[in-house]
Image (cartoon, rainbow, N blue to C red):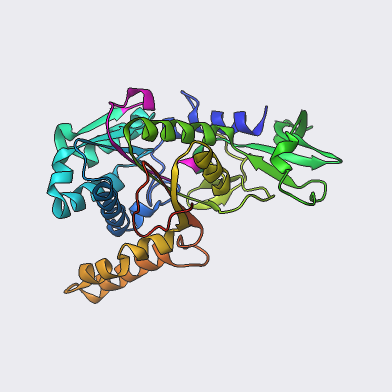
């Protein structure tokens, strides 16, 4: 089968899929996302959403949508800070969590129980009510299946998953080839064996998001790890118990992800006539919204141990280097109609 089919089965099979059978988040799971590192992350996202709402002219009601909401931690932090700094926004917002896992929905309902019937759950975009939309997705696109192609002679052939002589899963190549149009911007092709990745499913999801913004107005904030420009290389990876794992070793038991090609997302958004407000490193985004000032306020009067923990969290969220998210993660902001919203500088 293709890598994309293998990826999809491992994560979303109704009976054995990774996201259908376990709660992967936090120290007891397989990985930790930014909202689980510190409340500061969700608070900064909440402040951004208020800024975007104000830039759009403060329309009401607001459809506040999160796609792939994890344990509900980020939305909990978003709602707490918006209720404090923008009561009209909070009062006029209905919250919609797009979540396909019944197991994770149960966790989210517990996390967000204090907000009552303000929260509703949908399995897809087609279930969302009409209206002005502010949409956020953190670590969503990395979990959407991709296709991989391997350079072989004068073409790229699709990478497949098969069985070797010992009946173990192994990578091989199939007969399908890559459309040369994907390579038109490259002046020189790489050596044989080099991998090139595309993700049509990600583009399909983005198109649905953009169509909603065009229909009802609003802003989308996408946060994920990946690269700003299209290039060559194998980014398929698995994580299990907070350690990297062989992607073929534990199907359905390990999380599968790959790096997001933000250049391809931007190109599609521009083709759909979206306003691309900008694409920046997560560290720059968080600092531009006042991360360090909020961290200082949170640390004031606390014990040295708590102050140390807050400083460590800030460094992990916004710093650079191994184990830190500030440069590896990117933040893309799209709007319709055109607005200007800090800390982005519009990409015209």
Is residue 343 visible in the rendered image? The answer is: yes
Q: State the quadrant of the N terminus.
A: top right
Q: Nearer the viewer, residue 321 or 129?
A: 129
Residue 140 magenta-highlighted: yes
Identify the residue at image location x=16%, y=31%.
117
Q: Residue at x 42, y 34 (%)?
A: 209
Q: Residue furthest right?
A: 153
In the rendered image, residue 312 lying in the magenta stretch gets the answer: no
Magenta range: 122-141
Quarter assignment of residue 288? bottom left
Q: Position of residue 120 (x, y in %)?
A: 24, 30
Residue 239, image x and y in percent? 53, 47
Is any atom of residue 139 visible in this view? no
Work out whether 120 lies above or below 230. Answer: above
Q: Who is closer to the viewer here, 50 or 95?
A: 50
Quadrant position of residue 285: bottom left
Percent across and percent down for residue 138 are 40, 46
Q: Position of residue 227 (x, y in %)?
A: 57, 53
List the single residue furthest toward the bottom.
304
Give the vertical position of 321 relative to 204 (above or below). Answer: below
Q: Is residue 94 left or right of residue 236?
A: left
């Amino acid at each position: 089968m293709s890598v994309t089919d293998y990826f999809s089965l491992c994560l979303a099979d109704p009976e054995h899929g990774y996201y259908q059978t376990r709660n992967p988040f936090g120290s007891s799971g397989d990985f930790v996302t930014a909202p689980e590192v510190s409340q500061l992350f969700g608070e900064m996202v909440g402040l951004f959403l208020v800024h975007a709402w104000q830039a759009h002219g403060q329309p009401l009601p607001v459809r506040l949508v999160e796609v792939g909401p994890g344990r509900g931690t980020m939305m909990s932090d978003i709602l707490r800070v918006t209720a404090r700094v923008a009561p009209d926004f909070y009062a006029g917002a209905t919250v919609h969590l797009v979540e396909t896992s019944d197991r994770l929905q149960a966790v989210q309902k517990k996390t967000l129980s204090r907000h009552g019937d303000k929260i509703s759950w949908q399995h897809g975009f087609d279930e969302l009510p009409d209206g002005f939309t502010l949409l956020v997705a953190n670590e969503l696109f990395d979990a959407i299946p991709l296709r991989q192609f391997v350079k072989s002679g004068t073409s790229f052939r699709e990478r497949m998953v098969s069985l070797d002589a010992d009946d173990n899963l192994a990578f091989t190549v199939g007969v399908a080839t890559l459309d040369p149009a994907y390579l038109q911007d490259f002046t020189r092709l790489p050596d044989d064996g080099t991998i090139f990745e595309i993700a049509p499913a990600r583009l399909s999801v983005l198109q649905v998001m953009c169509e909603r913004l065009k229909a009802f107005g609003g802003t989308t904030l996408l946060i994920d790890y990946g690269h700003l420009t299209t290039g060559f290389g194998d980014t398929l990876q698995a994580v299990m118990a907070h350690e990297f794992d062989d992607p073929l070793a534990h199907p359905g038991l390990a999380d599968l992800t790959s790096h997001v090609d933000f250049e391809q997302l931007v190109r599609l958004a521009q083709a759909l006539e979206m306003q691309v407000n900008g694409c920046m490193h997560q560290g720059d985004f968080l600092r531009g919204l006042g991360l360090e000032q909020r961290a200082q306020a949170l640390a004031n009067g606390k014990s040295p141990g708590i102050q140390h923990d807050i400083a460590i969290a800030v460094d992990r969220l916004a710093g650079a280097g191994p184990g830190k998210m500030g440069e590896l993660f990117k933040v893309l902001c799209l709007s319709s109609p055109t607005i200007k919203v800090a800390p982005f500088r519009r990409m015209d």
